[in-house]
Amino acid sequence: MKNLKLILNPLNDENPITVQVLGICSALAVTVQMKPAIVMALSVIVVTAFSNLIISLGRNTIPPRIRIIVQLVVVAFLVIVVDQVLKAYVYDVSKKLSVFVGLIITNCILMGRLEAFAMANKPWASFLDGIGNGAGYGLILVALSTLRELLGSGSLMGYQVVPDSFYRIGYMDNGMMILPPMALITIGIIIWLQRGFNRKLIEK
Amino acid sequence: MNVQSNKYTFIYSTVIVLIVATGLAVVSTALQPAQVKNVEVEKKQNILTSLRVQTAPTNADNLYSQFVTGSFVLNRKGEKVSGIDPFEINLREEMKKPAGERNLPVFEALKNDSSFLVIPVYGKGLWGPIWGYISFLRDDSVTTGDPHFNTIYGVMFDHKGETPGLGAEINQPFFMVPFRGKTIFDERGNFVSIEVVKGGADPSSRHQVDAISGGTITSKGLQAMLDSSLISYQTYFKMNN
């Protein structure tokens, strides 16, 4: 039950993007299309889960004075491995993600979870916490990219879903959806909706 | 053990760095062949796209050996340079050299009994590099001294990070298809390149295509790329061979 909470909490009540407002930059950059967003989400899940696990395993041996450096080294290692694997096996997606895979290193969600959770909890719990937070980030990425690709390009996963007859009677894709400012506004709308349904999140 | 001591901190950091470095070296070495292969396949696909051949990553190797019959390197005087693999030439490095010293890769192709030359182009857009491949149809009916390769058969352009919806559209068919059939030499055999015209190309012109609205700097960069890349080949195109 407690373990389940570690995964489910970050999806809603403690969502890294919509509640803690972390990791916004990449959420704006890689959500023009669904496919790169999904790959990015999976990459972040892998990195948060395993960095949490590794740091938690070594939490009693890490010298406190250099703990942030050790965390960064572990995160950087995992991110480079993920980047190399993407380049080798999903080359076209890795080109679209370009620098943003590398920038997972600087994603605040990671350092936040390592400092706040993995340094003080057992490995298995930390691993689940990492998956939960990565998934919470990924959930928003997928939601955002679905909206942006549908309204901005008229397609989902690269397949056209808005029928040609719509375009013939004057429907046009919204070019603004492709650009980052509209992504920020869309995140705002998602936060608004989430707070509408989840009353706990509203500050007194 | 005292995790606070300097000695422990030094040893710990040394060990962790060594472990991570070894790990990365192993991963990099193991994945390198697949990564190199991806880059090679992409290049082959680009060349085939300029020849108007539909490709997928899985069949690019086969189609490439089917259509591309040879390749060589030229200098600006139109002479062949030996000892360099045209497939391995890094255009970004070549474009940094003075115009006279560049190695110019050429790919020969055969499709439906017609001969083609494919040449790579490389330049700057608004935010980063833009590049492409242009295929020319061989014309054997020309008189001596006039260019054998004048008519564009197909083009393929791509970019690193031009503005989505604006400059990034240079890799879309609506921009690339109008290049087909355009010529880079005028009737007297003088090099005129292709003009990317803002506000609409003259439909009767054989040297003009439409620029992209809102993508002015990318369009201009593309024009500059065509000018500077194509002019180096003009001597060879005019040679009677």
Image (tube, rainbow, N blue to C red):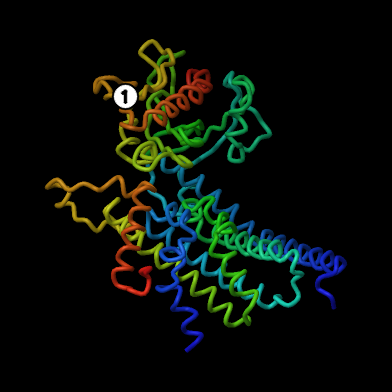
In the foreground, A41 or A26: A26
**Residue A104 position in % (x across, y down):** 55, 58
- Which residue shows up at 21% across the image and 46% down it? A172
Q: Quadrant of residue A126?
A: bottom right
**Residue B177 position in % (x across, y down):** 32, 36
Q: How many marks?
A: 1
Farthest-out residue, top: B188
**Residue B172 position in % (x across, y down):** 34, 41
Above/below status of B179 relative to A116:
above
Farthest-out residue, right: B7
- Which residue shows up at 44% across the image and 69% down it? A15
Farthest-out residue, front: A204
Above/below status of A96 relative to B185:
below
Q: Chain of mark 1?
A: B
**Residue B160 position in % (x across, y down):** 48, 42
- Which residue shows up at 32% across the image and 40% down it? B173
Figure quadrant of the C terminus of chain A: bottom left
Q: Secondary structure at mark 1?
A: loop
What residue type is disc 1 on?
Lys
Farthest-out residue, bottom: A1
In the foreground, A89 or A182: A182
Q: Residues within 10 Å of mark 1 (few under 14, many from 20)?
A: some
Above/below status of B223 relative to B186:
below
In the foreground, A191 or B58: A191
Image position of A145 (left or right of A171): right
Image position of A196 (left or right of B63): left
- Can you identify the residue that label 1 sits on? B198
- Which residue shows up at 38% across the image and 59% down it? A34
In the foreground, A162 or A136: A136
Q: Quadrant of residue A112?
A: bottom right
Image position of A176 (left or right of B35): left
